[in-house]
Image: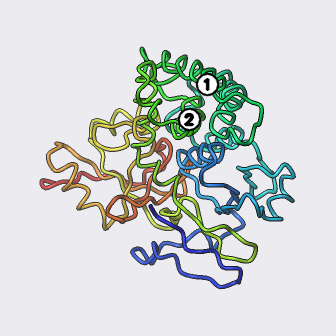
């Protein structure tokens, strides 16, 4: 798992190695005033769900990993309660509740419609309240003398069994599509599994819940949100989260290969919402784009046998959703649009392929 280089308490700087593949891309650290600051702790489930939402929304933030025993003065000045996550926006607004961070991030971009799904408030309140209380007293028994570990285990398992029953008929907690409840609860279910893995795996009632949890753990975003960073200190280097992403410059056109029929249908709605061949934005979470030099290989890999293809040239300055260049498994960076593509942002449409 990737580790961000150590934070050094000096004012030295370094070139982001990810930019070496694309020297024309400017890392966002050169524009610190426009980025939020996130204080986080890698293993904290509240911080995990906040980072998950930032990933989902296609956002980049300054990442300040903390040590729980040595919390930065800057964080405590922003939020006296001293818990993570703490998100400090460029205008000085402080968001220091994890659910509020999630809702803020998804208000910037919600490509899969988590906030439009069924109301998640009741399940999140149950998780953050009574379930978290049982989880803490089951997992950290030594911190709560006089409490019965077995009683808290049994009470927590009853809640987990109820959540699992919800998943017997639907793939997600509130129905057929993912919602804020799924994103907010899975880090805590993961933590419960760590407390007693053998019993969690052997419990037949929890089979649907295990399958649901595994979808989050198998998703590529899990490794990204669990990237490691050395504790931040004032005056040290300022890493970004996610560590394998950079900003997309707005002075270069972007490109997207589309099935001709899909593009024609977009004319009626005013937005194009296909991520890639055969997969919609709501399935993937972003629209795959390319820089010009990446188009030929993208075509050969995914579209060579797809019939009539058009190449869309996109003006990034006319996009209304976040753009982020994310690393794919090969290490190459590709620009991704975390929301619908407005048809007015498309500069030109050109037939593309061997016969064009």
Query: In terms of secondary structure, where does tag 1 sit?
Result: helix
Q: Which mark is residue 120?
A: none
- Residue 260, horizontal then vertical, whole percent: 27, 41
Query: In terms of secondary structure, where does tag 2 sit?
Result: helix
- Residue 353, horizontal then vertical, whole percent: 18, 54
Is mark 2 in CB contact (under 8 Å) with mark 1?
Answer: yes
> How many residues crowd around disc 1 within 10 Å: few (fewer than 14), some, or many (20 or more)?
many
Q: Which mark is residue 156?
A: 1
The residue sitting at 68% across, 36% down in the picture is 136
- Residue 337, horizontal then vertical, whole percent: 47, 50
Q: Left or right? Give the position of 132 relative to 218.
A: right
Above or below 274: residue 312? below
Query: 69 or 280, which is in the foreground?
Result: 69
The residue sitting at 52% across, 38% down in the picture is 190
The residue sitting at 55% across, 74% down in the picture is 5
Query: 284 or 306, which is in the foreground?
Result: 284
Question: Which residue does the numbered mark 2 point to in the structure image?
Answer: 192
């Amino acid at each position: 798992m990737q580790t961000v280089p150590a934070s050094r308490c000096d004012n030295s700087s370094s070139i982001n190695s990810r930019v070496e593949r694309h020297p024309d891309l400017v890392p966002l650290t050169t524009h610190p005033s426009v980025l939020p600051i996130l204080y986080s702790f890698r293993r904290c489930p509240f911080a995990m769900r906040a980072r998950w939402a930032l990933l989902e929304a296609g956002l980049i933030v300054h990442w300040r990993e903390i040590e729980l025993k040595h919390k930065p003065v800057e964080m405590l000045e922003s939020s006296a309660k001293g818990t993570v996550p703490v998100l400090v926006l460029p205008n000085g607004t402080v968001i220091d509740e994890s659910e509020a961070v999630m809702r803020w991030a998804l208000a910037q971009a919600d490509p899969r419609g988590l906030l439009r799904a069924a109301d998640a408030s009741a399940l999140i309140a149950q998780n953050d309240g009574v379930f978290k209380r049982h989880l803490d007293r089951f997992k950290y028994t030594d911190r709560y003398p006089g409490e019965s570990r077995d009683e808290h285990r049994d009470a927590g398992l009853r809640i987990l069994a109820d959540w699992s029953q919800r998943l017997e008929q639907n793939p997600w907690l509130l129905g057929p599509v993912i919602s804020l409840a799924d994103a907010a609860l899975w880090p805590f279910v993961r933590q419960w599994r760590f407390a007693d893995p053998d019993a969690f795996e052997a419990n037949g009632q929890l089979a649907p819940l295990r399958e649901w949890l595994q979808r989050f753990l198998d998703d590529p975003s899990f490794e990204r949100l669990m990237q490691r960073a050395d504790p931040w200190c004032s005056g040290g280097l300022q890493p970004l989260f996610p560590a394998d992403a950079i900003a997309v410059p707005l002075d270069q056109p972007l490109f997207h290969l589309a099935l001709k029929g899909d593009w024609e249908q977009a004319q009626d709605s005013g937005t194009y919402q296909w991520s890639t061949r055969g997969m919609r934005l709501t399935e993937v979470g972003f629209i795959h784009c390319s820089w010009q030099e990446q188009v030929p290989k993208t075509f050969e890999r995914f579209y060579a046998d797809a019939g009539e293809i058009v190449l869309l040239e996109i003006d990034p300055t006319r996009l209304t959703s976040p753009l982020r260049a994310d690393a794919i498994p090969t290490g190459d960076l590709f620009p991704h649009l975390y929301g619908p593509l407005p048809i007015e942002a498309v500069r030109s449409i050109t037939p593309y392929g061997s016969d064009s």
